[in-house]
Amino acid sequence: MTEAPAVIEATDLTKRFGDKTVVDHVSLDVRQGEIVGFLGPNGSGKTTTIRMLTGLLTPDSGSGHCLGYDITRDAEAIKRNIGYMTQRFSFYEDLSIRENLEFVARLYCLRPMAEHVDRTLDDLGLTSRQGQLAGQLSGGWKQRLALAACIMHQPKLLLLDEPTAGVDPQARREFWDQIHRLAGEGLTVLVSTHYMDEAERCHRIIYISYGKVVARGTVEEVIAQSALTTLVLQGAGDGRLVDALRREPGVDQVAQFGNTLHVVGTDAGELRQAVERVVQGRDIRVSEGETSLEDVFIRLMEQYGEARP
């Protein structure tokens, strides 16, 4: 099977602000039709990296191409061919949905304008609401309007920076259904997110911690690379048990879910011994569970957080 062509290729991107290195030799690639999740804690350099890829920021060192254009020399060409959806809703709240899209169509010199606007309204399920003021929309509908504005000029690459922050679960699911539909039609998507369920909907994920890429691959690959073991304790609702487990060597994480505890560690043997010591004489059933992506990310934050400048 032939590998899809690269839409983004970047090598050793580095960006400093004063004496602080925000992005430290980051390399990544994104293929046509892929949805790649870009993850990491606040301040890890995700947004700065995205801005360098789009030509909005010039890297201090490193190189890259986006849609075949050099990110340092061809910024204007890149901007014309991407859709970039930021965290913050940035449309005119005293204009209707249609009026906002007409404004965007004029910016891109789309002709005939009405045809482009009508098609976009229909594609995103906004036709029945086109006369509603943007300021009266719920978070989910504002998000849909923002997505419509980003794809109306039919970009080849969609960059999403925390696109579903503050949006309810149903709206988030509908948003991701739209993203997968667009990817199925050949659109490439790079999305930064804090939500684990959204990361799991990506074809691949890249985890960046304080400027450095520390994990990459499919969700299954990243979980396997972590080499974490998860034990599930049923009937363990006593809060004192949580404290006891956290004091044990070999226990890296303890998370409570009702009367169930998930206990995570990097050394399987040491973890089991620790759990056996704490639950001895108690009516608690211990079984092996599946390590979650959230477990992995918490481990990565703990592991690399100490290196934060």
Image (cartoon, rainbow, N blue to C red):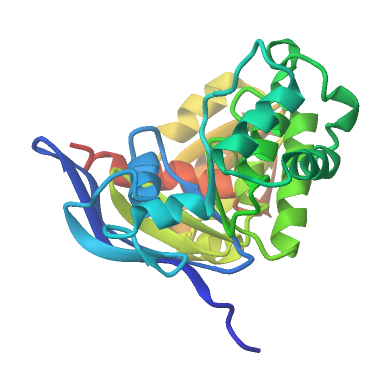
Who's the residue at 74% across and 63% down the image? Answer: 185
Give 65 or 162, whichever is nearer the viewer: 65
Who's the residue at 69% across and 59% down the image? Answer: 183
Q: Is residue 296 left or right of residue 257?
A: left
* Residue 174 point in image, percent of width and height: 79, 39
Q: Quadrant of the C terminus?
A: top left
Residue that extends furthest to the bottom in the rendered view of this protein: 1
Who's the residue at 81% across and 45% down the image? Answer: 119
Who's the residue at 30% across and 46% down the image? Answer: 304
Q: Is residue 104 left or right of residue 258?
A: left
Q: Quadrant of the N terminus?
A: bottom right
* Residue 109 point in image, percent of width and height: 59, 44
Q: Compared to 2, does 121 lie above or below?
A: above
Give 7 or 108, whichever is nearer the viewer: 108
* Residue 206 point in image, percent of width and height: 46, 56
Residue 280 appears in the rendering: no
Residue that extends furthest to the left in the rendered view of this protein: 19
